Amino acid sequence: MPKQVDHRERREMIARALWRVVEQRGVTHLTVREVAREAGMSHGQLQHYFASREAMLSFAMDFASEQTSLRVGQGLQQLGDRPHPRDVLRVMLTEMLPLHADARATSRMSAAFVLEALHNENFHARARDGMTQGRSLVEQLIRQAITDGHIAPGRDPAAEAHLLLALTGFTTLLELGVIEPQEALAAIDHHLDRLFLRTPED
Amino acid sequence: MPKQVDHRERREMIARALWRVVEQRGVTHLTVREVAREAGMSHGQLQHYFASREAMLSFAMDFASEQTSLRVGQGLQQLGDRPHPRDVLRVMLTEMLPLHADARATSRMSAAFVLEALHNENFHARARDGMTQGRSLVEQLIRQAITDGHIAPGRDPAAEAHLLLALTGFTTLLELGVIEPQEALAAIDHHLDRLFLRTPED
DNA sequence: AGGGTTATCGGCCAGCTGTATTATGTCAAC
DNA sequence: GTTGACATAATACAGCTGGCCGATAACCCT
């Protein structure tokens, strides 16, 4: 029944199957055949949508980034107009940590991707650029917050941005069950509480 | 010339070869044959020292933990008697981050190990226990520092311990070249500066 | 209605994987 | 000097890997 098919949609479907394989069975089981099985198709069919394993991985990773950005965007939208920068940072952090099913899938993809990126020039550049962009974003947000009087002027925007990004280190602790989600959230709130000044309008 | 051979020594030599493979070529190239080649022996010989691939990985990981602990211990020794808890935490953090060759090797091993541990019950328990132990250590250190007046009594020891452990998240930023080592160190010092009180005897 | 495109399937391949087995060489003890 | 344990090497093997190709079928357009 080969109707005309939406390739983009099919690829996303395959990418989600790939995420499930990574999440449920681990990177070592990330093979073309296994992904095809998870997606409910033959590996011949899968090759019709991805010419190579690398192309499949590449798409799945980009898609994971997109979906994470999307979740962050949705979280920000719920904060309404002119949200407090503290809440903005909190949304960004919590959506990047494996605190719920969607985030866990993309988080594991990201971890596996980074590990491979260290020995793949193509992947490396993209991972690096993505993170550098995030770093600039956070730093700019902090600068603005200082200007707006939400953060003490003495704080170093670069160092504070680095510290916030480093908090993605909670990922490992959460995944291994060393700490519970609410403990991670409490620690993040502690950190943000000390970063931001208590201003009257809050 | 099969003299009597120190098995432990041989295994450590193989483990270091395994680290080099992981560091230089990536986890995907972590195969019995590749490790044997890196160690300069036939894969038949390697099998004489490790009955299975899993046994080899297991040993290499334990050995990485040991060596990391050793480096931390050496760093602490250089601080002399009764070191300031701030310096103790700084040594622990800096030895866990990929800031020099030895640390980078064990750090990458650890990252690969965690990723696999999520789907291997044996590995999972050991990774979890190791981190839980580290968590307790840091938390106890903070409690003592509060008692000794180095940290404000209002601080939550658990949350502060979690934040410090989360700073291992610098690993990813460093490995990808998003930030430079001195930037990570500066951020860590910023954090420690705010955690500890300035006491007269310092 | 028919020709061209697209979709799907199944099997094939060379290469690599971890493991098991066998053969050969080398030492120490009796 | 023979025996037995140990060390090393080489090979065999079944299974899986990613990539490739041909067959078949379903659709679209003219």
Image (tube, coloured by chain):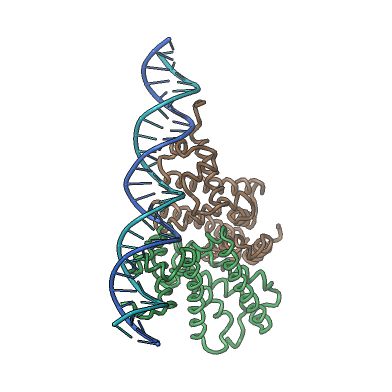
Chain colours: A brown, B green, C blue, D cyan
In this view, the residue in front, B81 or A34, is: A34
Q: Is residue B116 above or below residue B149?
A: above
Q: Is residue D28 above or below residue B202?
A: above
Q: Is residue A69 above or below residue A200?
A: above
Asked if residue B58 lies left or right of residue B129, the reply is left
* Residue found 62% across the figure and 61% down from its top: A174
Q: Is residue D26 above or below residue B134?
A: above
Q: Give the image quarter of residue A119.
A: bottom left
Q: Percent position (x, y) of residue B13? A: 40, 74
The number of callouts visible is: 0
Asked if residue B59 lies left or right of residue A167, the reply is left
Q: Percent position (x, y) of residue B169? A: 53, 64
In this view, the residue in front, A6 or A186, is: A6
* Residue found 55% across the figure and 61% down from its top: B117
* Residue found 44% across the figure and 66% down from its top: B180
Q: Give the image quarter of residue B148.
A: bottom right
Q: Percent position (x, y) of residue A190? A: 66, 66
Judged from this view, the residue extending furthest toward the bottom is B81
In this view, the residue in front, A75 or B137, is: B137
In this view, the residue in front, A67 or A163, is: A67
Q: Percent position (x, y) of residue A165? A: 54, 61
| Quarter of the image with the C terminus of chain A in it | bottom right
* Residue A197 visible within the image: no
* Residue B58 visible within the image: yes
Asked if residue B152 lies left or right of residue D29, the reply is right
